[in-house]
Amino acid sequence: MANFIHPLSDVKSVEIGENTKVWQFCVIFPEAVIGNNCNICANVLIENDVRVGNNVTVKSGVQLWDGITVEDNVFIGPNVTFTNDIYPRSKQWPEHFEKTLVKKGASIGANSTIVAGITIGEYSLIGAGSVVTKNIPANTIWYGNPAKFIKYVSNDGKPFDTKEQLIDYCINHNIKISHND
């Protein structure tokens, strides 16, 4: 099945995967790469040096700036804000933009801010409105300003108070646990 690109979007990239939907008022730069079966909701901007994996949902109002990689099965909630320059100034560009990596299965809640140059671990969950200023380990839940560790979480979304509970659950349900980043 072919992808769907809404006629009111401005998509310059030819690397849009099968079954991917790009909704109205999106802007996607020529060198961006977007995987299969993604949903890019209205009013999303994706710059050139951006890679989006398969089965990713990017909700409305998100900008993916140069240097951001989003792996498979990631959820990015509405109005999540990413940065790519630690010391921004108007009309002054850094030698290179910081690299931010959102690993497979992670979920980022609405209106969160992700500071440049960090990694969000596999299957981690960032609560709505959080400000993430450091690397987030796999299978953990964080929220707040600044975001703080709250609980552990399995790949299928069940929260646990201790790492031991998480490991027991995963063993008993034959679920592979991600290695901490």
Image: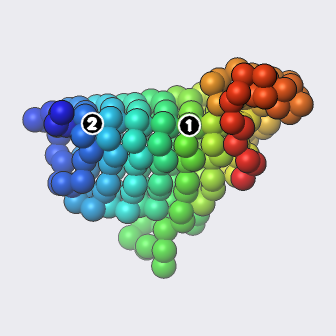
Callout 2: few (<14), some (14-19), or many (20+) C-alpha neighbours within 10 Å?
many
Residue 74 visible in image:
yes
Q: Residue, x 43% and y 73% (percent of image)?
A: 92
Amino acid type, label 2: Thr
Q: Nearer the viewer, residue 174 or 180?
A: 174
Residue 50, placed above or below residue 74: below
Q: Residue, x 24% and y 40% (percent of image)?
A: 18
Q: Residue, x 17% and y 46% (percent of image)?
A: 10
Q: Is residue 159 left or right of residue 42?
A: right
Q: Which mark is residue 105?
A: 1
Q: Is residue 154 left or right of residue 43?
A: right
Residue, disc 2: 20
Q: Give the SS element for disc 2.
A: loop
Q: Give the SS element for disc 1.
A: loop
Q: Nearer the viewer, residue 46 or 33?
A: 33
Which quarter of the rendering shows the N terminus? top left
